[in-house]
Image (tube, coloured by chain):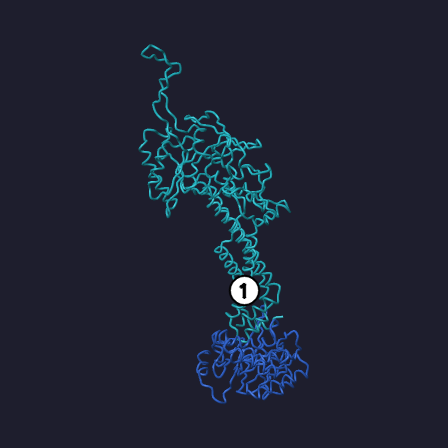
Chain colours: A cyan, B blue
């Protein structure tokens, strides 16, 4: 009882406890901000790593997998598989309407299947928006003026050609590919072309690779941009271009092709029954099947990517046995050579995720070590306070307070300071994290300081979510640390000789 | 053996004429740096129920130390086996030297009320809170909450008795020396202890104020029949007691 009264009085009558609470507050805020941003970054990376990919991918780059339709049928026959779709990935060159070139990753997709596996239609950026964003006070967002159903072109990867009265193949580019937009509180506003990229024509150049692994030729084709997509993952948004798989197959010479009779040569002549010569028409001795470099697979509900990976591998082995005589060069790689991986283990991404996990842990440990300084600071402040309150301790002991009671007075005092500091620090961290993007933008404008570079951190926005569980852990730790800081001074107070304490000057 | 010899007396029931508090042949030595400074050298003192005993002595004679031993704030030195086995401080015939820390805390909070020369009030608390703090320590959170109204009433009455009814919400720093000492006496009395130990209660006050403080203490004692031990170096203060004991060089002068 007396501890509560004295704690209240000590708190409101001295500056030192407020300094201790400020130290706790700063440490709690610091750790929570770092953990929220870095942890949020990791979470975004993990969730975004799956974007435009599906749960599991079968990959055989450059040469591609033949008979992939059968493989997809086999996969989709499994109850563990929800959907599978073929894609082709190739390096390419994109020439923008301003004639600027961009090196891009061209991905050929079957729009319907690709959307079923990845839900990419949801990521099409240019869709009519009924209401402006909260920060768009002047209605600058171009989406406000788009016609309803504009995203339909992006869904089908086609664009109407009024001259020919038919739909032509079109492409969908990542929103950061062109670098034509300025990111503002009104969303992405046009700054280069005067209007958005869709409906402009771009040229894509790719290089077909021969069976021997050398570049055969280059293939260029112009397309209208049907829409742009935004995943939020800068690496994807700044590099990927989607186009119809059949068009890309043709450009890369991966489409279905007839195999001519090897004995046929141009200029050969044959005579009919009347002895009239005719040029020998090339005979086909077989068909070279179309190929896809990747098969993206989505698991059925309740099937983890790891379980799906095992299932896919089994199905692939069975499928590959059917074409065992063909070999890798013929588009049927041996099971031990084929690349099958979950989205988390996608080459490049896995190393990066591990690096970010370790970096997050490292930064947290560093900040926790710094936070120990607060514990020492509280220890020093409480040590000084116990010295200052020596006479009070003597008085309390004289009226019968026990050693434990006196110790609890200071421990409780430390705990209250810790709780206060933690609550304020937690609140401060919440406000900062929630507004970290505007704060960062302001720092960029006012101080020229850009800490979060999307080209380094992959994402265009800094993570701004505070997880309640993390906040609880940090705040409870802050309060406990404050109490730990008060532990030694409390013990000192408890073991003080009451007679000496009363005589203390 | 000292401890063994003390036991029969410690467990013996108190007789009507038996002292309520007794220090018998107690020793206390303090260590100052590397030097042992003997303060009490076999001092003895006893007080019967309702008696007021003054301990008169010069500065450094060991008066305050004797008072601390009587009040359980400090413990007497343990004597070697071959010295008189009877030395101890006893309350109602029970040696408090053998009390556990918990028993000693309980003894201080329920049996003893201290009044100090320099008041020793808690500067952050109001006058009323300074008085009630002893009750809070005695009853604990639950006990105090159950009795808070009655205890506040008693504290207010005590302070009113000392002419401090208008000062309840004042801090000690806003009071005069005499007023502070009255608050300290009210704090010592709030738990109605059977033993009031006053260490130079008027030593820091002018004669008139000191006199009025003593008047108030004596008036209360006559009502409550409390046992009182007053340590003083002032003859006139000592003269107000029922009995005066002189302490010289750590011993009671014959």
A453 or A249: nearer the viewer: A249
A220 or A430: nearer the viewer: A220
| Visible residue check, residue B208 | yes
Q: Quadrant of the C terminus of chain A?
A: bottom right
Residue B37 sits in quarter: bottom right
- From this viewpoint, which residue is outermost toward the top? A275
Q: Where is residue A168 drawn, in percent x and y? A: 48, 32
In the rendered image of this protein, does residue A251 appear above or below residue A137? Answer: above
A17 or A102: nearer the viewer: A102
Q: Where is residue A290 drawn, in percent x and y? A: 39, 30
Is residue A89 left or right of A307 when viewed as pictured? right
Q: Where is residue A422 drawn, in percent x and y? A: 54, 59
Q: How many marks?
A: 1
Secondary structure, mark 1, is helix
Residue B30 sits in quarter: bottom right
In the rendered image of this protein, does residue A308 appear above or below residue A330? Answer: below
Residue A425 sits in quarter: bottom right
Q: Where is residue A437 drawn, in percent x and y? A: 57, 48
Disc 1 crowd rating (10 Å Cα; few below 14, some 14-19, many 20+) is many
Chain letter for the residue marked with disc 1 in the picture: A
| Visible residue check, residue B70 | no
Residue corresponding to mark 1: A416
A351 or B15: nearer the viewer: A351
């Amino acid at each position: 009882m007396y501890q509560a009264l004295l704690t209240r009085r000590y708190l409101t009558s001295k500056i030192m406890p407020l300094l201790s609470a400020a130290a706790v507050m700063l440490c709690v805020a610091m750790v929570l901000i770092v953990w929220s941003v870095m942890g949020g970054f990791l979470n975004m990376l993990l969730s975004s790593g799956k974007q435009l990919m599906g749960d599991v991918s079968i990959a055989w780059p450059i040469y591609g997998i033949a008979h992939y339709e059968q493989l997809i049928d086999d996969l989709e026959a499994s109850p563990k598989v929800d959907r599978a779709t073929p894609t082709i990935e190739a390096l390419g060159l994109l020439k923008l309407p301003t004639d600027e070139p961009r090196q891009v990753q061209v991905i050929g997709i079957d729009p319907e299947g690709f959307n079923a596996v990845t839900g990419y239609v949801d990521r099409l950026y240019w869709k009519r928006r009924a209401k402006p964003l909260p920060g768009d006070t002047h209605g600058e967002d171009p989406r406000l003026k788009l016609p309803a159903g504009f995203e339909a072109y992006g869904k089908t990867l086609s664009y109407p050609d009024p001259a020919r009265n038919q739909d032509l193949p079109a492409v969908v580019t990542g929103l950061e590919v062109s670098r034509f937009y300025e990111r503002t509180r009104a969303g992405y506003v046009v700054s280069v072309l005067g209007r958005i990229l869709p409906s402009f024509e771009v040229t894509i150049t790719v290089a077909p690779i021969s069976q021997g692994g050398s570049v055969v030729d280059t293939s260029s084709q112009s397309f209208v941009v049907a829409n742009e997509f935004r995943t939020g993952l800068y690496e994807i948004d700044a590099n990927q271009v989607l186009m119809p798989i059949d068009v890309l197959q043709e450009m890369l010479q991966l489409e279905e092709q007839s195999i001519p009779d090897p004995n046929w040569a141009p200029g050969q002549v044959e005579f009919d029954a009347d002895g009239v010569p005719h040029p020998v028409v090339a005979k086909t001795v077989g068909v070279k099947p179309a190929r896809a470099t990747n098969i993206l697979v989505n698991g059925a509900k309740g099937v983890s990517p790891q379980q799906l990976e095992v299932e896919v591998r089994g199905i692939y082995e069975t499928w590959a046995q059917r074409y065992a005589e063909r070999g890798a060069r013929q588009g049927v790689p041996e099971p031990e050579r084929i690349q099958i991986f979950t989205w988390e283990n996608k080459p490049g991404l896995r190393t990066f995720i591990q690096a970010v996990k370790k970096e997050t842990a490292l930064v947290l440990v560093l900040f926790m070590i710094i936070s120990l300084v607060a514990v020492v600071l509280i220890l020093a402040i409480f040590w000084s306070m116990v010295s200052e309150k020596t006479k009070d301790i003597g008085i309390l002991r004289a009226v019968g307070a026990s050693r434990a009671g006196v110790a609890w007075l200071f421990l409780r005092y430390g705990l209250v300071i810790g709780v206060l500091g933690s609550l304020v620090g937690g609140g401060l961290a919440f406000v900062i994290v929630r507004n970290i993007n505007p704060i960062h933008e302001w720092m960029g404008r006012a101080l020229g300081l850009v800490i979060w570079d999307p080209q380094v951190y992959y994402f265009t926005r800094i993570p701004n979510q505070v997880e309640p569980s993390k906040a609880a852990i940090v705040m409870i730790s802050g309060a406990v640390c404050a109490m730990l800081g008060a532990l030694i001074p409390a013990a000192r107070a408890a073991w003080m000789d009451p007679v000496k304490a009363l005589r203390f000057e | 053996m000292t401890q063994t010899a003390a036991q029969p007396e410690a467990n013996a029931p108190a007789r009507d004429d038996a002292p309520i508090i007794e220090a018998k042949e107690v020793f206390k030595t303090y260590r100052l740096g590397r030097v042992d400074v003997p303060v009490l050298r076999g001092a003895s003192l006893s007080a019967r129920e309702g008696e007021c005993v003054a301990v008169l002595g010069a500065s450094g004679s060991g008066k305050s130390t004797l008072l601390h031993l009587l009040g359980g704030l400090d413990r007497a030195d343990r004597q070697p086996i071959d010295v008189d086995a009877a030395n101890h401080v006893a309350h109602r015939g029970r040696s408090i030297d053998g009390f556990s820390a918990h028993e000693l805390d309980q003894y201080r909070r329920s049996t003893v009320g201290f009044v100090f020369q320099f008041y020793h009030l808690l500067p952050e608390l109001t006058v009323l809170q300074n008085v009630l703090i002893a009750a809070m320590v005695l009853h604990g959170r639950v006990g105090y909450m159950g009795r808070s109204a009655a205890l506040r009433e008693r504290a207010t009455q005590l302070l009113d008795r000392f002419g401090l009814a208008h000062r309840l919400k004042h801090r000690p720093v806003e009071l005069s020396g005499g007023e502070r000492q009255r608050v300290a006496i009210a704090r010592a009395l709030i738990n109605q202890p059977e033993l009031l130990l006053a260490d130079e209660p008027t030593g820091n006050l002018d004669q008139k104020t000191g006199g009025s403080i003593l008047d108030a203490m004596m008036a209360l004692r006559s009502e409550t029949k409390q046992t009182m031990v007053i340590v003083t170096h002032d003859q006139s203060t000592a003269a107000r007691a029922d009995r005066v004991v002189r302490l010289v060089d750590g011993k009671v002068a014959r």
